[in-house]
Image (tube, helix red, strand yellow):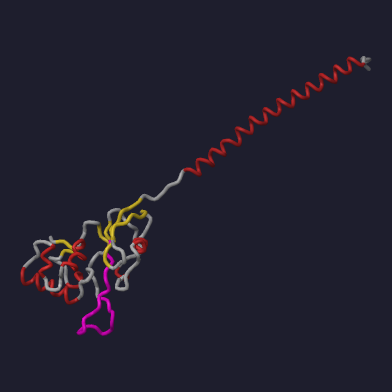
Amino acid sequence: MFNLSDQEKITIIFLLIIIIIVSGVILYRNFNVEDEFTINPSENSTENNSTVKIEAPPVIIHIAGAVNNPGVYQLKSTDRIIDAVKIAGGATEEANLDAVNLASLLKDGQKIIIPYRIVGTTEENNSDNSYKNIDSIYTSSYSDKININTANSNLLQSLPGIGPVLSERIVEYRDKNGLFSSIEDIREVSGIGEKKFEGIKDLICVQ
């Protein structure tokens, strides 16, 4: 159909090769641009998701009473009283854990008093290691303490080292001598020395 010389054929073939190469380069560049727009956003989204973490705020609590290492501890707001007992070295053998809601969530500034198990006196004890009812809130705010001017014998026995005999002495002393004017006055009760006072002074108040 066309009578082309060898030189013209070579020229046409050369031009076709150039066109194919240029077209390939253009297609390759377009493919990369689309790739960047489709892949990079997902990568950024993944990076953002991996860096955004919501952590529970810390809370400072004071745990006292029948635990091995009473004191002030920092935990998370999602922790519960059972976690506070664990971090305080666990409960002692004398602890009355039935009197505490171990599933309660912790609050910042909370004071937790783990009560001691109260053993009944000889006259009223039909079985050893019986429990008495304790009309007290053991997971109170940090400032709540046992008022030694109004607490009854059962409530006083929730204090570390205060048993039935000492609690009755405190009530009798209060009835005989009037209300305590300061927490230090409780040392006037027979059987409450300096060491025992040190163990309860942070748990009591006068009002």
Which stretch did the figure color magenta?
112-131
Residue at the spot x=21%, y=59% of the render?
A: 144
Question: Which image quadrant is residue 91 in?
Answer: bottom left
In the rendered image, the vertical position of residue 146 relative to residue 118, given as above or below:
above
> Is 120 colored magenta in this rendering?
yes
Residue 142 location in percent, x, y?
Answer: 24, 56
Q: Quadrant of residue 203?
A: bottom left
**Residue 20, located in which quarter of the rendered image?**
top right
Q: Is residue 119 left or right of residue 192?
A: right
| Residue 5 falls within the magenta-colored stretch | no
Question: Which residue is nearer to you in this view: 40 or 185?
Answer: 185
Q: Residue at x 50, y 44 (%)?
A: 50
Q: Quadrant of the N terminus?
A: top right
Q: Residue at x 24, y 73 (%)?
A: 133
Left or right side of 57 for 173: left
- From the top left corner, tell me how far across and down residue 29 is, in percent: 67, 27
- For image coordinates 54% across by 42% down, the residue present is 46
Q: Is the magenta region chiefly helix, strand or loop?
A: loop
Residue 136 on image: x %, y %: 23, 66
Quarter of the picture holding the C terminus:
bottom left
Examine the rendered structure and indicate whether residue 24 appears above or below residue 92: above
Callout count: 0
Q: Could you tell me residue 125's position as x and y percent?
A: 24, 83
Foreground residue, 85 or 192? 192
Q: Is residue 23 left or right of residue 10?
A: left
